[in-house]
Image (cartoon, helix red, strand yellow):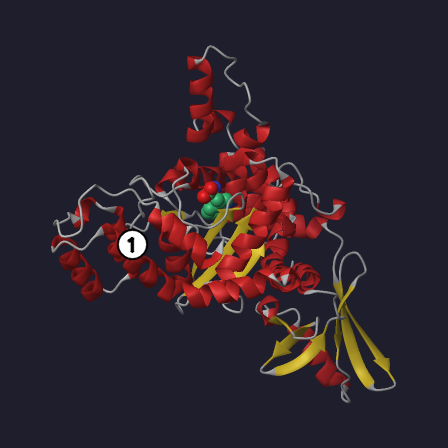
């Protein structure tokens, strides 16, 4: 199975060169790998924690989406979506909130820093702290756990959040693992994610030599303001006062560090030699500007074109949301059942699964059978119509889940319908391109579902059909 790599970008700012070199460029490159399924999303719910200016959040969403697409993110290969288009994420957030220790959140760096600062100033410890800031790690855990991500590429400042996502996921797995399996899930509810910190990717220095960051106000814009803004910002890079002709120290200069992030090794060596040989700062900055522009001018053109057509970006993101929801919605359906929020008909008996009992796992198999029996049964109904002999799979609630093709021979129809009861039947359900799903055996389509409005509803119906098939054997 492919490694799932997932990361989010908070939509509060305008992308700068540091974001490009440190995050966007490597992420786009890694998304082209065949052994990786990549998920990139705009963390716009997280943006609300940091920013209450709607115009800025809206603008940033557009700019960041356009930037990623302009830089080569291929939405056909990567699932690219907005967090706020996925209702399963806030839904999962609540399920996770209820298993998250408050003490864990008390220890989050961002929250603690706010409390420490308040305390130092003699203010109320929680002054100015929103519940959103406090809950930030749980929302982030939901982002990650909803999609069973294996790896999460992040900056160092986010590592604690990934560790918290692991803790929260592990706690949920412990409490509800048995119930999850009774509810039809496989393995554990959640895959535990790992943080991936790209050590090789340089953090770019900003205008003043400190790390390029919006919070230091020392950034060079990537696209915003066009080539003119790029040149102006580069002109403001702080340098020492050595004159043209005097040798310069490349290693203490932002100009060289930024140049190196855009140049091949031999170009960087030539630039180094020129600085050591006395190239003036003015000329060095001109060369830097040309080098950066050679890489980003074609991207900027695409960016400008995309920014002029927000509707197209909207379509791309909605399509991405459809793909993301097709994965998250069926999982949420099982999770809801696992915590006891499924249909009333499939209620757990207290002695089947006690979510808070550590020993529940060992009783899972027995509990699974009992829970299946206590449900009203799904069934296979055979009938005859003008075209021949058919059968349908009907869910416990009476929903028609599958309708077979017509068979001329009643025995062939009977044999096909018994295939529904086989051990491997659940794996023989496969989505079709037209909103339906099929039951196939030996390459033959035996039965199909009704057509669903979208892939999310179809996939949820597949989950219901699996449950029905399982209960046929129960
Ligand atoms: N908190 C991250 C940041 O500020 C953004 C983010 C939100 C994220 N959800 C995520 C990153 C999930 C990785 C995975 O950088």
Image coords of residue 20 (percent x, y)? 40, 54
Image coords of residue 215 (percent x, y)? 43, 36
Q: Is residue 232 left or right of residue 279?
A: right
Kindly identify which residue carries mark 1.
285
Residue 222's image quarter? bottom left
Asked whether residue 79 appears in the rendered view, the answer is yes
Q: Is residue 453 left or right of residue 166?
A: right
Image coords of residue 225 (percent x, y)? 49, 54
Q: Observer-nearest residue: 452 or 218?
A: 218
Image coords of residue 220 (percent x, y)? 40, 48
Q: Observer-nearest residue: 460 or 125?
A: 125
Q: Observer-nearest residue: 49 or 172?
A: 49
Q: How many marks?
A: 1
What residue do we see at 20% from left, 53% from top?
Answer: 280
Residue 263's image quarter? bottom left
Query: In the current view of this chain or complex, which residue is farthest to the top?
Result: 122
What residue do we see at 44% from left, 37% from top?
Answer: 164
Q: Is residue 296 left or right of residue 401?
A: left
Q: Is residue 245 above or below residue 356?
A: below
What residue do we see at 54% from left, 31% from top?
Answer: 133
Considering the image in quadrants, where does the N terminus appear? bottom left
């Amino acid at each position: 199975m492919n490694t799932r790599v997932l990361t989010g970008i908070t939509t509060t700012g305008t992308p700068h060169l540091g974001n490009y070199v440190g995050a966007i460029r490597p992420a786009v490159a890694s998304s082209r790998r065949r052994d990786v399924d990549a998920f990139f999303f705009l963390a716009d719910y997280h943006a609300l924690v940091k920013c209450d200016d709607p115009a800025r959040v809206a603008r940033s969403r557009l700019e960041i989406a356009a930037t990623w697409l302009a830089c080569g993110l291929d939405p056909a290969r990567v699932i690219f979506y907005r967090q706020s288009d996925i209702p399963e994420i806030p839904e999962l957030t609540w399920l996770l909130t209820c298993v998250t220790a408050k003490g864990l959140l008390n220890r989050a760096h961002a929250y603690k820093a706010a409390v420490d600062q308040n305390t130092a100033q003699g203010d109320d410890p929680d002054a100015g702290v929103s519940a959103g800031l406090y809950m930030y790690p749980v929302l982030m855990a939901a982002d990650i756990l909803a999609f069973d991500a294996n790896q999460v590429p992040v900056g160092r400042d986010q590592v604690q959040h990934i560790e918290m996502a692991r803790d929260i996921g592990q706690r949920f797995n412990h409490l509800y693992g048995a119930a999850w399996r009774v509810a039809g899930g496989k393995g554990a509810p959640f895959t535990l994610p790992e943080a991936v910190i790209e050590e090789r990717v340089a953090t770019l220095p900003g205008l003043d030599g400190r790390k390029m960051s919006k919070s230091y106000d020392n950034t060079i814009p990537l696209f915003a303001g066009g080539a003119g803004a790029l040149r102006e910002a580069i002109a403001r890079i702080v340098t020492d006062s050595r004159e043209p002709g005097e040798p310069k120290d490349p290693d203490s200069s932002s100009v060289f560090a930024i140049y190196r992030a855009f140049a091949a090794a031999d170009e960087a060596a030539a630039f180094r030699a020129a600085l050591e040989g006395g190239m003036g700062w003015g000329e060095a900055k001109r060369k830097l500007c040309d080098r950066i522009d050679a890489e980003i001018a074609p991207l900027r053109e695409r960016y400008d074109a995309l920014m002029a057509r927000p509707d197209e970006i909207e379509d791309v993101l909605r399509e991405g949301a459809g793909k993301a929801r097709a994965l998250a919605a069926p999982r949420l359906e099982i999770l809801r059942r696992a915590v006891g929020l499924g249909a009333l008909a499939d209620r757990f008996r207290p002695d089947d699964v006690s979510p808070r009992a550590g020993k529940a796992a060992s009783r899972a198999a027995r509990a699974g059978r009992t829970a299946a029996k206590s449900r009203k049964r799904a069934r296979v109904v055979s009938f005859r119509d003008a075209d021949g002999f058919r059968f349908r799979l009907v869910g416990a609630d009476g929903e028609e889940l599958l309708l077979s093709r017509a068979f001329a021979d009643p025995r062939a129809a009977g044999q096909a319908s018994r295939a529904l009861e086989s051990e491997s039947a659940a794996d023989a359900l496969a989505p079709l391109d037209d909103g339906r799903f099929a039951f196939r055996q030996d390459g033959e389509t035996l039965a199909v579902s009704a057509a669903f409005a979208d892939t999310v509803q179809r996939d949820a119906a597949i989950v219901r059909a699996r449950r029905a098939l399982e209960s046929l054997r129960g």
